[in-house]
Amino acid sequence: MIEADLYSYLKNDTAISAIVGTRIYPKVAPQNVQTPYIVYHEIISDDNQCMGGVIYQTDTRFQVDCWSPIYSEVKALKAAVKTAIVGFKSSNSITTRDDYEPETNLYREMIDFILKD
């Protein structure tokens, strides 16, 4: 399953684990989680079929959100995640976006990409 592969890949990357340890969560982070952390989720999945109807490849779009109360730390985490996913399962079209959540006082870096499986 590509989602499990992504989680394992991020968790085992030394640059990422140096920043977040094992704080990598699907969909939402637990309440009162220590920062910084990562949340990932699948946005959409597209099955590619050949003329005979057999699925030969699935393209899955993911979003990884990096969270931290320290701007430089969230930027470093974003850079580590981007570096890690380049070339993983043929990721391409990597886009990023800045955000700030005033309710939580956390900076967020959103990373959007497609994996092929």
Image (cartoon, rainbow, N blue to C red):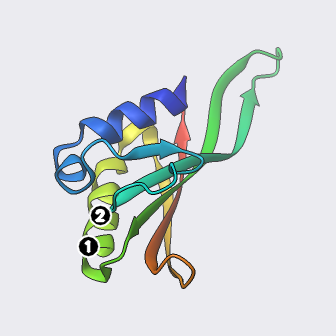
The quadrant of the image that shows the N terminus is top right
* Closer to the camera in the image, 105 or 92: 105
- Residue at 60% across, 47% down: 27
Q: Is residue 12 left or right of residue 103?
A: left
Please tell me how crowded label 1 is: few (under 14), some (14-19), or many (20+) other residues with Cα within 10 Å.
some
Please tell me how crowded label 2 is: few (under 14), some (14-19), or many (20+) other residues with Cα within 10 Å.
many
Q: Is residue 117 visible?
A: no
Q: What residue would you read off at disc 2?
A: 77
The quadrant of the image that shows the C terminus is top right
Q: Quadrant of residue 12?
A: top left
Q: Where is residue 99 shown, x and y percent of the image?
A: 52, 80
Q: Where is residue 89 shown, x and y percent of the image?
A: 43, 36
The residue type indicated by label 1 comes to Glu
Q: Are marks 1 and 2 in contact (CB under 8 Å)?
A: yes
- Residue at 76% across, 15% down: 54
Gap in angstroms between the C-alphas marked 1 and 2: 6 Å
**What label does residue 9 carry, if any?**
none
User: How many numbered marks does the figure carry?
Assistant: 2
- Residue at 53% across, 33% down: 3
* Closer to the camera in the image, 22 or 90: 22
Q: Is residue 62 left or right of residue 46?
A: left
Answer above or below: position of 106 versus 2: below
Q: What residue would you read off at disc 1?
A: 73
- Residue at 31% across, 74% down: 75
- Looking at the image, which residue sits at the far front? 32
Q: Name the secondary structure under disc 1.
A: helix
The residue type indicated by label 2 comes to Leu
